[in-house]
């Protein structure tokens, strides 16, 4: 197998709360995986996040997108802290970067690992992936406030759905479905919303003609929420807009053992923007600082990153090592019902990388 010769240059944004804890657990594992195949990783750590916001009034520098573009990809922990309004940090950093870099889709694979207990029964063999549109929909940032402070305050949040953006998300989802089982479920809400989601249904049905090997179904989001619990193995690739994709991916994470288990990739398929790879979870302030966060979501995000950069062997090795470590309940963090620390689980994974 040929490997990319140049060192891989990564930006690392640990962020807030458990972000730095799971990043610290992940970086050595990624390094070990790439070193084992004769490659080299370089990490530039960026101090973007809540602390910077409190210090300097901005969560990241004005030229953040340009800084990111000097790298091959970004590994991101999470942002959010109780003493800063959420929208300042989440919008200021991750949603902002997704838009500035035009990272079209957020790919969120969910896989049940053997030996990991779940709150939902009968999840063995669950293996699905949510392709979430990442730049428009309800998170496009259009709207405003009227009558502020009068007691009759009015909030207007406008959802935007455009053909170009639906098409590019759809092409990525169909391509994935072709590589997997050939089944694609589009999630919309066209019975109650009359413009944006019917447009999704039409455009995705048109795109489907280019992928004769993929069977498309259109499912209403509320029905999909129930089906994900009742029949999760009936699902393979889900395509959803920004809001529904966000909500359903937390639900899907529960099928794999919880928020600590779900990785994601923000990417522009076929484009030249660096991808941003991050756990689906946030900064988890309720457990931050105790060293007990589950690092698996971040480790698997690292594997996605390496896979997308062509280091498929390193990505495979990380997934194997994570799967192996999770077989032993002694390595389970408290969210999985165990007593292991973040470092215990990360060390168990690292040991498997080195054997
Ligand atoms: P959250 O994902 O941080 O936490 C939800 C629940 O999952 C909590 O009980 C938490 O303890 C648990 N959890 C999360 N990650 C875990 C891990 N690695 N191991 C074990 N348990 C874990 O979501 P929440 O509480 O709604 O938000 C907290 C903060 O994070 C907020 O400020 C929010 O805005 C921000 N946030 C940031 C995101 C990002 O940076 N991409 C995404 C989601 C939320
Ligand atoms: Mg979310």
Image (cartoon, helix red, strand yellow):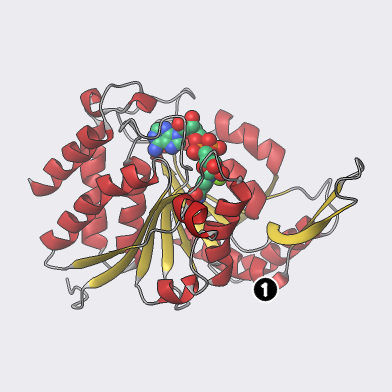
Badge 1 local density, few (<14 within 10 Å), some, or many (20+)? few
Residue lying at 40% horizontally and 34% vertically, measured from the top left: 288
Pick the residue in front: 48 or 204: 48
Left or right placement of residue 172 versus residue 319 in this view = right
Q: Position of residue 115 (x, y in %)?
A: 30, 27
Q: Position of residue 133 (x, y in %)?
A: 60, 59
Regarding mark 1 in the picture, which secondary structure is present there?
helix
Left or right placement of residue 342 versus residue 214 in this view = left
Q: Position of residue 42 (x, y in %)?
A: 23, 67
| Quarter placement of the N terminus | bottom left
- Tell how many labels: 1
Instruction: Confirm or reject: label 1 Cβ below 8 Å from ligand 2.
Output: no
Residue 114, picture quadrant: top left
The residue at which mark 1 appears reads as 164
Residue lying at 70% horizontally and 37% vertically, measured from the top left: 222
Pick the residue in front: 54 or 6: 54
Does residue 92 appear anywhere in the picture?
yes
Residue lying at 63% horizontally and 36% vertically, measured from the top left: 225
Residue situated furthest left in the rendering: 355
Q: Position of residue 343 (x, y in %)?
A: 22, 36
Residue lying at 57% horizontally and 59% vertically, measured from the top left: 92
Q: Is residue 275 above or below residue 287?
A: below
Ligand 2 is found in which quarter of the picture?
top right
| Quarter placement of the C terminus | top left
Does residue 211 appear anywhere in the picture?
no
Pick the residue in front: 254 or 236: 254
Left or right placement of residue 1 versus residue 305 in this view = left
């Amino acid at each position: 197998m040929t490997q990319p010769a140049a060192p891989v240059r990564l930006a690392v944004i640990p962020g807030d709360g458990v972000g730095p804890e799971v990043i610290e657990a992940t970086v050595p594992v990624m390094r070990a995986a790439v070193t084992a195949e004769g490659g080299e990783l370089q990490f530039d750590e960026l101090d973007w996040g809540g602390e910077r916001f409190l210090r300097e009034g901005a969560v990241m520098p004005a030229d953040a997108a340009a800084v990111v573009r000097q790298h091959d990809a970004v590994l991101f922990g999470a942002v959010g802290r109780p003493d800063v309004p959420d929208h300042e940090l989440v919008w200021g950093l991750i949603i902002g970067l997704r838009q500035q870099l035009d990272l079209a889709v957020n790919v969120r694979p969910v896989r049940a690992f053997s030996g990991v207990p779940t709150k939902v029964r009968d999840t063995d063999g669950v293996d699905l992936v949510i392709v979430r549109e990442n730049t428009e929909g309800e998170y496009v940032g259009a709207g405003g406030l009227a009558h502020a402070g009068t007691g009759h305050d009015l909030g207007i949040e406008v959802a935007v759905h455009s053909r170009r953006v639906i098409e590019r998300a759809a092409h990525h989802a169909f391509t994935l479905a072709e590589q997997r089982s050939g089944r694609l479920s589009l999630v919309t809400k066209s019975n109650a919303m009359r413009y944006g989601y019917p447009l999704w249904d039409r455009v995705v049905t048109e795109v489907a003609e280019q992928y004769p090997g993929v069977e498309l179904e259109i499912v209403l989001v509320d029905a999909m929420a129930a089906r994900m619990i009742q029949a999760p193995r009936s699902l393979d690739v889900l395509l959803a807009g920004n809001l529904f994709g966000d909500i359903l991916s937390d639900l899907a994470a529960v099928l794999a053992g919880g928020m600590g288990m779900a990785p994601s990739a923000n990417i522009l398929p076929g484009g030249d923007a660096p991808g941003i790879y991050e756990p689906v979870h946030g900064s988890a302030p309720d457990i931050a600082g105790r060293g007990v966060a589950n690092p698996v979501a971040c480790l698997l995000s690292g594997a996605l990153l390496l896979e997308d950069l062509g280091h498929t062997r390193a990505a495979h090795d990380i997934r194997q090592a994570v799967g192996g470590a999770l077989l032993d309940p002694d390595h389970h963090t408290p969210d999985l019902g165990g007593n292991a620390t973040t470092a215990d689980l990360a060390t168990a994974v690292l040991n498997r990388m080195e054997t």
